[in-house]
Structures are given as structure tokens and as C-alpha cells.
Image: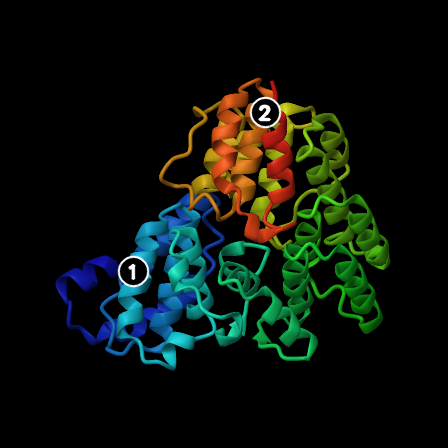
Amino acid sequence: MLKRITSEFPDSSARNYFPYINALFQPMNWIANLSERSHVSIDLKECIQHDPNPPTMWHIHSAVERAASLGLLGKWRQAWEEMQELYARLTEAQRKHFMFQPSRQVLALATGREEELINAYDLTYWSTWSFEHYTGIPGHCAIRRGEVSEFIQRFRRGDRQKCHFEASIPQIFLFVLLSHHDLVGARYFIEGMTEAGTLYGGDLLGQGYTITDAQDDELVEHWIAKIARFQKDEGAYNQVVPALRARLALERGDWKTAATHIQQELSISKGVAFVRLQLLLRIVIGSGADIGLSKREMLKQAHEQLAGPHLELALICLQEQKPAITDLWPHPKWMPELRLWLALWLEAQGKKSQAYNVAEPAIDNRYGLMHCQPALKKLLQRVSSK
């Protein structure tokens, strides 16, 4: 109906009410399939593309949500092009909008446009949730622009930006510290977070995944010991800890241990952050070891809750699709866990050469112990050995 209105009456003032309709339609939970939900979201937002110049806040919000839906489907280039078209029409103040600015930075990373990254302290807000990636945008800006030392110095002086979730700020700093190979500093920082009561603010999984990236057992167990007081929170500790231990085992090629840990995880709640990444981890492990779920059950979960490259990886592991990197996958140095997990699966299938070719482009020495680099490098050593 909205499409017909916009087609037949392009100049109608009814367009002014479309953003409100969009708000009412969110989050469209009546559509069970994520891919279908994303397509409906994109179509809905297309109805309000012909917006005023400069666009209103409603239109900016809608454009960002459309870009996120395109990203979920793996349409990264289209999302970037639309974001750039909008960027050209925004005022300088609007370009710093708390949703628009970090989303544009994510798309620059996903499409390999590092020259578009800005100084982390020029970001109006520090975000960890854009496009559901757990590492946080400020750290990537600092690392790729070669400004890690400056970032650490300013942060330690108490200089930091606003964040959507203040409790996510420590997670951002941990990411930068560990990219600097500072395991001792990370351990002391976790101690300080515990004393200040900022260790956990609703994002245990984001913190845990960041720490797990370093592949350091002592650091992981130290962090787990510090969050033990959240054991009664079934939506957090009891889901996160088994998942992190499962991920550690998987990324070392130990599928049996990974399956043992993932079986202890409670059923994934829609309220848990990064739920799709959690589900994908479960399916990847379940494709190579018994986790108590049938292939049919895992396929159903994949089709309902995954889309884009995440869905493709699940289908590859469940042998419903040929193992290949398609146009739906982001730049090799963004979301490297996807390439890592595919390469691990290929290694388990005895396809070492393919595993190497999938994983090698994700290597980026600037990230130190972060961004899956330790696990990627160990995998490459295994599959390249004679």
C-alpha cells in the first residue's frame, strides 16, 4: 500500500507520516524469518527515501535501519552507496548523529574503505552495537589509523566520549589494550573494572568475546572468575561462559570439547546480545560434533534467525551449500570470525588448501591479539604444514 501511494502520488504530504508508520512497524517480530523481515524493513524504508533536504532526524534513523537490514542480508556495497548519498545531503551536525556516524564507519570497514575512518575521539558517540558487531567501532578506528598509543594515553587520562551504553566503554578499552599485546594491562584493567563495579552492564557476551579473541586461557579464566557473581542470571553467565569455552576449543580445532561446552549452554534467548553470532557458533560446532541437535533442527534455526553471510556459513557447514566466499561476505578484514569458522570447518573436512585460502586474507597484524588474529595464525600454521 505504501509503495503504491509513493508511486502514484510522489509529491503527497502523506510522506511526512511514513516515518511514524515505520516506527509502529518495528521490530516486525510477527515475521519469523530474519531474511524476510529484513526485506520487509528495506521495502518499508524505501517508501520514505524521497525526504527533505536536509533530511529530518526521522529520515536519518530510517536510513540507518535500512542500511543495517542491507548489511544483515550481505548487501554491503548497496548499503555504503546509499549511506554516502545521504551523507552528501546532511549538515555537518547531522553527520555526527549518534546512529549515523558509527554506522557509516562500520560500512567503511565492511567494504574496505579505511580512508573513510576518523579519529576515535572525533566520534560523537562510542558504539559497540552497530550492525551487531561486538568489538566496538572506536578501537577499529584507532588501530587502523595507527593511533593506538594516543588512544590509550587519552583514555587513561580520563578522556572519553559518550557511549550508548556506558558499561561498554571498558570493553572498548580492553579491545585496544589487547591489540597492543598488553595482557598484563588487560588483567589489571579487569581488576579495576571489578572494583569500580563496571565489569558487567548487560553485555557479558561482548566483553567475553573480546577477551576470548586473545586465546589466552589465564586471561579468560581470570575474567570468568570475576563475573561469577552473575551465575544466577540465566540470561547472562550461564549462557556466556559455556559459549566462550566452546569457542576457545573450536578455534583450536578441538571439536569434541567445543561440543561438550556448547551442550551446557541454555537455550538462546532473543534478549541476549549478538544472538545471531551465538546461534551460528552453535551450528558450526554442531555440524562437526554431536551437540544434541539434528541437522533438521539446526537448518530450521538457521533459516529463521540467520541471514546473509551468517546464513551462508551455516548452510555450508550443514552441507546444504558449496563452500565458497560470495559477494554477501564483507571485506576479508571485517568480521574475520566468519572466515575463521569456515576455515576450521574446511580443515576438519581435510581441505587444508581451501582452509588456507579462506583464512589468509583475514590476517591483519595491526590487531595484535584481537580480531581473531591468534586463532587465524595458528590455523594457518596447521594447514600449511607438510
Image height of 308 relative to 40, above or below: above
Image height of 363 relative to 349, above or below: below
Disc number for residue 263: none
Where residue 29 appears, x then y in whole percent? 49, 53
Residue where numbered disc 2 is placed = 383
Q: Residues within 10 Å of mark 1 (few under 14, many from 20)?
A: some
Q: Say what secondary structure mark 1 lies in.
A: helix
**How far apart are the two marked residues, 2 and 1, measured between alpha carbons?**
40 Å
Q: Residues within 10 Å of mark 2 (few under 14, many from 20)?
A: some
Residue where numbered disc 1 is placed = 82
Q: Tell which circle, 2 or 1, labels the residue nearer the N-terminal end.
A: 1
Where residue 296 appears, x then y in whole percent? 56, 25
**Residue at position x 45%, y 59% from top?**
106
Could you say which is closer to the camera, residue 236 or residue 250?
250
In which quadrant is the N terminus drawn? bottom left
**Residue at position x 59%, y 64% from top?**
148
Q: Say what secondary structure mark 2 lies in.
A: helix
Circle 2: residue type: Val
**Residue at position x 24%, y 76% from top?**
52
**Numbered disc total:** 2
Where residue 366 appears, x then y in whole percent? 56, 53
Where residue 151 appears, x then y in whole percent? 60, 70
Circle 1: residue type: Glu
